[in-house]
């Protein structure tokens, strides 16, 4: 595994354990995080990133964040994966995405996730997963 990918796997383990302090330990103070790059403005700075994670954590249970493919070059990591979790009211949300992470001195300085927020909204509303989402999750029948 590459160094950047190894850091991300530790972030994933910390997030699945709901350990926000540990997740924050992998982020630089000046992080710029585009958690929905084409839809919403970025979160800037570690303090604001923590607030976002605290908001997310309240509604994310049984987290199965998975990476399907990745490529690393220098201090940049490209990933394809899925955010997969159960909401507080028992609905499964599985949102495929592509992300790019940038690192400096072993800390994440930039994070851009390219995700369709409408997919998450549909799942939270209880709509069935589309065939294309099931295909991306490897769950198509």
Image (cartoon, grey):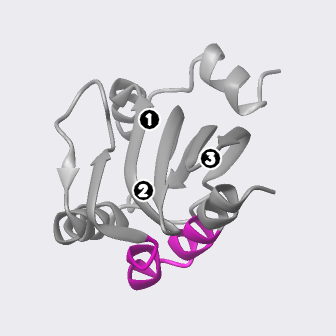
Determine which residue is flagged by label 1: 123
Residue 59 is drawn in which quadrant?
Answer: bottom left
User: Regarding mark 1 in the picture, which secondary structure is present there?
Assistant: helix
Towards the viewer: 108 or 97: 108
> Residue 135: horizontal and vertical position, in percent?
72, 21
| Residue drawn at 49 percent across, 68 percent down | 105
Of pointers 1 and 2, the one earlier in the residue sequence: 2
Q: Which residues are magenta?
A: 10-26
Determine which residue is flagged by label 2: 87
Determine which residue is flagged by label 3: 74
Whether residues under marks 1 and 2 lie with C-beta atoms below 8 angstroms apart, the answer is no
Residue 112 visible, this angle: yes
- Residue farthest to the top, as pictured: 131
| Residue drawn at 65 percent across, 15 percent down | 131
* 27 falls in the magenta region: no
Towards the viewer: 53 or 89: 53
- Distance, label 2 to label 3, CA atoms, is 36 Å
Quick check: 35 left or right of 140? Answer: left
Residue 91 visible, this angle: no
* 20 falls in the magenta region: yes
Towards the viewer: 19 or 110: 110
């Amino acid at each position: 595994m590459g160094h950047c990918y190894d850091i991300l796997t530790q972030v994933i383990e910390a997030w699945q354990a709901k350990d926000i302090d540990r997740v924050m330990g992998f982020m630089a103070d000046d992080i710029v995080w585009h958690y929905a790059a084409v839809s919403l403005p970025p979160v800037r700075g570690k303090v604001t990133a923590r607030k976002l994670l605290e908001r997310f954590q309240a509604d994310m249970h049984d987290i199965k964040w998975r990476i399907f493919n990745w490529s690393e070059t220098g201090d940049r990591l490209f990933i394809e994966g899925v955010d997969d979790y159960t909401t507080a009211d028992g609905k499964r949300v599985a949102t495929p995405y592509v992300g790019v992470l940038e690192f400096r001195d072993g800390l994440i300085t930039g994070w851009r996730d390219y995700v369709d927020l409408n997919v998450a909204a549909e799942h939270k509303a209880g709509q069935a997963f589309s065939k294309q989402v099931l295909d991306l999750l490897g769950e198509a029948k």
